[in-house]
Structure formats: structure tokens, C-alpha cells
Image: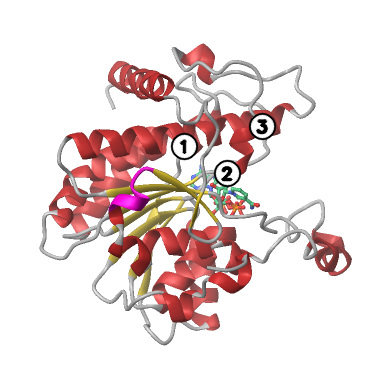
Amino acid sequence: MGFFSKSFNPVTDLPDLSGKVILITGGNAGIGYSTVKHLARRGAKVYMAARNQTRAEEAIGKLKAEGLGPGNGDVIWLELDLKDPRNAKKAAEEFMKREKRLDVLIHNAAVLLEDYAITPDGVQEIVMVNVISHIVLTRTLQPLLDQTAAEPNSDVRIVVVASEGHRLVSGESHFRNLDDFNKEFKSSLSPSFARYCMSKLMNILYAFELQRHLTAAGSPITVIAIHPGTVNTFSHKPPLANFEFIVKPILSLFFVHPDEGAYNSAFAAASEEVAKQREKYKGMYLMPVGKLKEPTKVARDEGLAKELWDTVDRFLEEKGI
Ligand SMILES: NC(=O)c1ccc[n+]([C@@H]2O[C@H](COP(=O)([O-])OP(=O)(O)OC[C@H]3O[C@@H](n4cnc5c(N)ncnc54)[C@H](OP(=O)(O)O)[C@@H]3O)[C@@H](O)[C@H]2O)c1
């Protein structure tokens, strides 16, 4: 494969996805929206798990207006607000009532740069949305993922959209308890960015630990963590929205369009390269597009990943989720 934008084109490089069922969180905007488009255009039935019905329906209308050919897959809204892990459980249960298979699950939704906020469950919001609720979603869907994976010729994948931002986590990382989860990074230059980076480190640790658990249990499921690139998913939002006509051309020098920013997600979710060489991609971290790269030593720390996994377990048990 060559350079970022020339290396992979979902229109020509993804196989026919008719018959596949895919669930993506946060598919109503940004990279998630474009990922839905690439996969539905190849014929997949894609569930867009999003918190706001109006925004989801508008996004589905826009996708249809942009065109879902040639594959003409379906796009269906699934209600999911990741601020509360109970919603993740409920959404997964609702999904399992509607579908008999799940080929690909994509953890895409994220809170990016928000003020520090603690949810009623005592965990900071960015960790709840970006990490814990996604874990609940996946665990609840596990029986359906396993059932699909047991079918002949299946190729079940879980894609975790992480970030190169994980490299910027400063200080020692621990995930022993909720205090560790709720770190504010007050002395950091940008505390909100530091908290985001920590959540993305947690995404990679979790993805690798999940792969270890699945492999140990004899499951063929592939878990891949990815970095989507540096993607302009913000120039249309305040405070830049009013100046988008000036800002966007400048940003395009440094940031790619979300359609291109979704290539790595689409590659991890559905490419034939991964199908042909599953062992090569299992529990790996990919840069755009489809390039294996080592995350930091901390992100590969199995002890830290287990610590994170166990703390989430204890938290969910205490909450009865
Ligand atoms: N953009 C980049 O350069 C970049 C770089 C590295 C990694 N990433 C990763 O790529 C992924 C997508 O980012 P993006 O840039 O596309 O962000 P975005 O445009 O802000 O989209 C985020 C998505 O997450 C959803 N979301 C946020 N909070 C939610 C909640 N409580 N419940 C359900 N959905 C929620 C949003 O829904 P609403 O519309 O309802 O808010 C939206 O659909 C993230 O995991 C991010 O960390 C992005």
C-alpha cells in the first residue's frame, strides 16, 4: 500500500458486504457517518447507534441523498446514549431482539474536548462514554457475536477507534480504581485534551485485552484498534462554523475529510486483507490505511490492561450492570 489517501479506496477495495450486519456507535456525525456510508455502499445493513433521534434521522436522510449505491445497504437508527452504561445494555438487548447476527461492531463514538464532568455513577463522563459503556455494549452483544462467529465462513470483527493521542498521556498510568479513572490532569496545559488522550489509551488497552480473552476462549473473533488520521470533524461546529468558508480550506492542508478519515475504520471492519490474514491483524493497532504500528509501551502493558479490565468488572458488578 502507498500513501494515506492513495492506498485504499472503499469503493473498489471493499468486498460485497450484502448479508453482513454491522453496528457502529456515533454513526450520525464525523468519521462514524462516513464509515456508515462506505459500508452501506457495499451492501451492509448498518445500525447507527446514536443518542439523538433527530440527528440520527437527519444523518440517514443525508446518507440517502448522497447515495448508498452500488450496494444499497440499509442504515437503521438504534437509540444509544453512552453516558449511562445501562443504556448500552438496553441498546444491545434491543439489537439482539431485532437481529440474528452481528458481523462487525465498531466502537467509534467519543466525547472529545469537554469540560470535566462526573456522571451520576461516579465516573467521569469521557471515560464512561469512550470506554465503559462501549465495554458494556460489547459484553452484552457477546453471545450474538459468538453465534455469528460460529457460522461457516464468518469473519466477525470488533473495531475500536482509538487515537495517536494515546502517546501524549503524561505521568504514570494506573487503572486500579475510580480515582484513577477520574483523573482531571489539572496541571496539564490542556486538561480536557489530556483526559481525552487517557481515554484513548484505555481504548487500546481494552482492545488488546479483549483480544487476549477471546483468543484464550478459542474464539475466532478479530479485535483491531485503529487511529483514523487527523480528520476535520469540527470546522462546521461552533466556534468555527461561522467562518467555515475561510477556515476549511486552510484546515484541509492539515486535516483530511471525514470520508477519508473513515478509510481505516472501513479497512479494519471489512477489508479482504484482514479476512485473508486474520492472525496478522488480531489485537493490532493500525495507522491509516491498514498499516500495523506499535502503540506505546504503556498501551501494550498487559498488567495495566488487566488492571483496567478488572476495575471495570468491579464497577459494573457494584452497579449491578
Ligand atoms: N477527528 C480526528 O482527527 C480523530 C483523530 C483520532 C481519533 N479520532 C476518534 O475518531 C472517533 C470519531 O471522532 P470524530 O472526530 O468523528 O468525532 P465527532 O465528529 O465529534 O463525532 C463523535 C460522535 O460520537 C457521538 N457521541 C458523543 N457522545 C455520545 C454519547 N453520549 N452517546 C452516543 N454517542 C455519542 C456523537 O454524537 P452527537 O452527534 O449526538 O454528539 C458523534 O456521532 C472518536 O473515537 C475519536 O476519538 C478522531
Disc 2 Cβ-to-ligand 1 distance below 8 Å: yes
Cα gap from disc 1 to disc 2, whole angstroms:
9 Å
Q: Which residue is mark 3?
A: 168
Q: Which residue is mark 1?
A: 204
Q: Which residue is mark 2?
A: 163
> Horizontal and vertical percent for residue 54?
52, 61
Query: Tag 2 or tag 3, which sits nearer the N-term?
Result: 2
> For residue 30, which quarter of the picture?
bottom right
Query: Badge 3: few (under 14), some or many (20 or more) residues near its Cα, within 10 Å?
Result: some
The residue type indicated by label 1 comes to Ile
The residue type indicated by label 2 comes to Ser
Q: Residue at x 55, y 75 (%)?
A: 62
Residue 149 relative to residue 92: left or right: left
> Horizontal and vertical percent for residue 60?
48, 71
Query: Badge 2: few (under 14), some or many (20 or more) residues near its Cα, within 10 Å?
Result: many
Rendered position, 19 above or below 138: below
Query: Tag 2 or tag 1, which sits nearer the N-term?
Result: 2
> Horizontal and vertical percent for residue 141?
24, 45
Q: Residue at x 66, y 57 (%)?
A: 231
Could you tell me if residue 47 is visible in this image?
no
Cα gap from disc 3 to disc 2, whole angstroms:
10 Å
State the quadrant of the C terminus.
Answer: top left
